[in-house]
Structure formats: structure tokens, C-alpha cells
Image (spheres, rainbow, N blue to C red):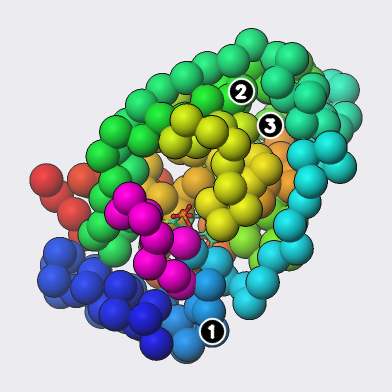
Amino acid sequence: MLGMVGLGAVGVAMGARAQSGVNRALGPVSSRISGFVPAAGGFRFYSVVDSVKPVDPARYRLTVGGLVEHPRSFGFADLQALPQTRLTETFHCVTGWTVPQVAWAGVALPDLLDAVGVRPGARGVRFTSFDGAYTEALTLEQARRRDVIIATSMLGGPVSHEHGGPVRMYVSQMYGYKSTKWLGGIELVDTVKPGYWETRGYDVDAWIGRSNGYTS
Ligand SMILES: Nc1nc2c(c(=O)[nH]1)N[C@H]1C(S)=C(S)[C@@H](COP(=O)(O)O)O[C@H]1N2
Ligand SMILES: [Mo]
């Protein structure tokens, strides 16, 4: 299984304590990772499910709810009508592969939060994927960073289906697993709950270089 090769490499880059944690976390799950395909430009395509039904941008909906003043959904054009944020950064998967100088564009999460209004009592943001399995989470403070983007563009074009299009997250200063692909929902919550990989051993606070056993 190719996925095993990539995930096994974590052990080289990480301390023994983190390595055993990750191996424990990934043992039974990695055998189910079937979406691992080496991609051009250094990216690997990851999915925790066998297949994801492609969604046309014209039919895409992002549901935003929970502890917000104005729950609503956003179509692809609605997202494009909000202020656009662009940034270029190196992408880091926690397993050790990186892709330099990746261009992203879309809606900065704080701008979307302003559009719906965050209700008092909200402490975190939960992300769900229309793949039906993946979840992620940020604290409200992290979610208000301007380098956290609801991406409608990646690598200078639309976000491809393999990369989680038509809309995916990009959490710039954290490892790749924080960046939910095939984004379907954003929910304001009163408690941060660990996401998919975090219930399997990864850190919830996934700062690049200082989480998951890295100390650079
Ligand atoms: N829905 C979903 N999002 C996901 C993942 C996934 O398996 N499913 N993998 C995460 C991980 S571990 C990484 S490194 C990046 C990889 O993005 P890519 O597949 O576009 O290279 O997506 C993240 N988002
Ligand atoms: Mo990753």
C-alpha cells in the first residue's frame, strides 16, 4: 500500500514518542487509505474514503451554522462575491513532504465569520467534508487568523477534485491535515472537538515545526 510508505516515513522525521503515537493511530486506519496517489508538483492526493463524488461549482453549497447570528449557505458564486484573500506559502504534510510556494485564493475565514456573525459563547469552529468522513476543528482565535482561507483557487486555477475542490480549507501555519478538503460545512461550536486524524493521535494544535513531535 503506497499510503503506508508515506505514513511510515513519519518515523524518520519525528521523535520516538510521537512516532509510536502516530503508528498506533495510523495502524488500522492506513489500510483503508485508498486515495493515496503520487501527484505532480510534490503534492500527494489524500483521502480517507474510497471515493468522493465530484461536485460541480454551480451546485456547490457551503452550510454555515451553529452559534452564528445568521445561519445560511453559500454557493460558489457567493464565496467569490465576498472579499478575496490571496497568499502563497509552503504546504507541509505532517508526514514530511512539502510543496514550496503554493498559491491560494478565496475567502479569509474571519471575513466569512463576519458575514454570518459569531454568537457569544462560540469557542471553536468545526469543519465537515462532503466526503462524509473527514472533520477538523480550530479554536475561534485560530479561525480569526487572516491566513486561514476557504479556498476556491489553488496553484493558480480552480481547486481540482483530487485536491478537494470545488472548495477546500487552507490553514496556512498548520500541518496539512488541518486543511479540510471537499469542504461542506462550517459550524460554530462552544467546545473544540478533535478532528478525524486528531482522534487517531495527531495534535489538535498543529503548528508547523512545533507540534506532533517536531521541535524545529
Ligand atoms: N476530506 C479530507 N481532507 C483532507 C484529507 C483527507 O484525507 N480528507 N487529508 C489531509 C491531509 S493529511 C493533507 S496533508 C492534505 C493533503 O492535501 P492534498 O490531498 O490536496 O495533497 O489534505 C488534508 N485534508
Ligand atoms: Mo497530511
- Amino acid found under the numbered disc labelled 1: Arg
Task: From the image, tell me which residue sits under label 3.
Answer: 122
Q: Position of residue 113 (x, y in %)?
A: 68, 22
Provide the residue designation for mark 2: 107
Q: Residues within 10 Å of mark 2 (few under 14, many from 20)?
A: many
> Which residue is rendered at x = 33% and y = 50% of the image?
41
Q: Which residue is mark 1?
A: 32
The type of residue carrying mark 2 is Val
Mark closer to the chain start, 3 or 1: 1
Residue lying at 82% horizontally and 30% vertically, measured from the top left: 74
Q: Earlier in the sequence, mark 3 or mark 2?
A: 2
Q: Position of residue 107 (x, y in %)?
A: 61, 23
Q: Is residue 47 left or right of residue 129?
A: left
Residue type highlighted by circle 3: Ala
Q: Residue at x 65, y 40 (%)?
A: 167
Q: Does the magenta run of residues contain 42? A: yes
Task: Tell me the magenta residue range.
Answer: 36-45
Residue 130 shown left or right of residue 127 in the figure: right
Q: Are marks 3 and 1 in contact (CB under 8 Å)?
A: no
Q: Which circle's residue, 2 or 1, is located before the other in the chain?
A: 1
**How far is mark 3 from mark 2, CA to CA?**
20 Å
Figure quadrant of the N terminus:
bottom left
